[in-house]
Structure formats: C-alpha cells, structure tokens
Image (cartoon, grey):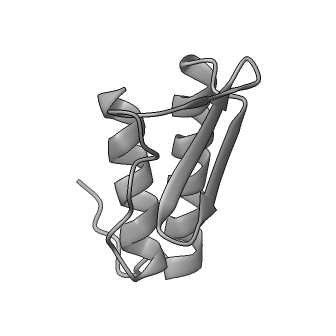
C-alpha cells in the first residue's frame, strides 16, 4: 500500500465536506442550506424544515467543525 507524505490542506477538506453537504441535501430534496447566527435553516419545496418547531442550532465555532455538524444534522433528518 502506498503511503502519502502530504496532508490535504484544510481548505480542500472544507470543500470536500461542503460537497458532501450539497449531496446530502440534494438526496433529501433540500433546495437551500443556510446558516444565520447559530441556526441552520433548510428549505424544501419552499418551506423551512423545523426540528421540534425550531431551526436546528449549531454549536461549533470553527468552520471545519461547523461544516461537519451540518453534515451530521442532515444525516439525522
């Protein structure tokens, strides 16, 4: 097995995670993924998707962790 001696830059990892978010959203027919403050706002067929009557909250302050958190929340819908 070949070994890699370089690490993928953080920006590239973020782009890969973003592509995964777009794919997960498309599979669930979510047309818009948006964050405002610490809220995740998802739109399907023109309507917002609420969880227990609220927008899901995001807790991670770092962009890398926040993107992963969004991906995980999409997986739970």
x 51%, y 52%: residue: 40
Outermost residue on the left side: it is: 1
Measured along the vertical axis of the image, is residue 56 above or below residue 12?
Answer: above
Q: Where residue 67 sits in the image (x, y, percent)?
A: 46, 61
Q: Where residue 50 sits in the image (x, y, percent)?
A: 47, 33
Measured along the vertical axis of the image, is residue 36 above or below residue 16?
Answer: below
x 65%, y 53%: residue: 34
* Horizontal side, residue 4 vs residue 30: left or right: left
* Horizontal side, residue 25 vs residue 74: left or right: right
Which of 29/55 is in front?
55
Outermost residue on the right side: it is: 46
x 38%, y 63%: residue: 58
Numbered-mark total: 0
* Image-quadrant location for residue 2: bottom left
Measured along the vertical axis of the image, is residue 24 above or below residue 4?
Answer: above
* Horizontal side, residue 27 vs residue 3: left or right: right
Q: In this rendering, does residue 9 appear at all?
A: no
Q: In this rendering, does residue 34 appear at all?
A: yes
Outermost residue on the front side: it is: 53
* Image-quadrant location for residue 23: top right
* Horizontal side, residue 26 vs residue 75: left or right: right
* Image-quadrant location for residue 53: top left
Q: Where residue 9 sits in the image (x, y, percent)?
A: 51, 80
x 54%, y 19%: residue: 28
Quarter of the figure with the C terminus:
top left
């Amino acid at each position: 097995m070949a070994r890699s001696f370089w690490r993928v830059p953080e920006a590239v990892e973020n782009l890969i995670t973003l592509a995964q978010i777009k794919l997960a959203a498309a599979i669930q027919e979510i047309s818009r993924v948006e964050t405002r403050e610490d809220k995740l706002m998802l739109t399907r067929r023109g309507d917002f998707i609420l969880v227990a009557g609220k927008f899901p909250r995001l807790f991670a302050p770092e962009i890398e962790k926040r993107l992963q958190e969004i991906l995980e929340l999409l997986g739970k819908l």
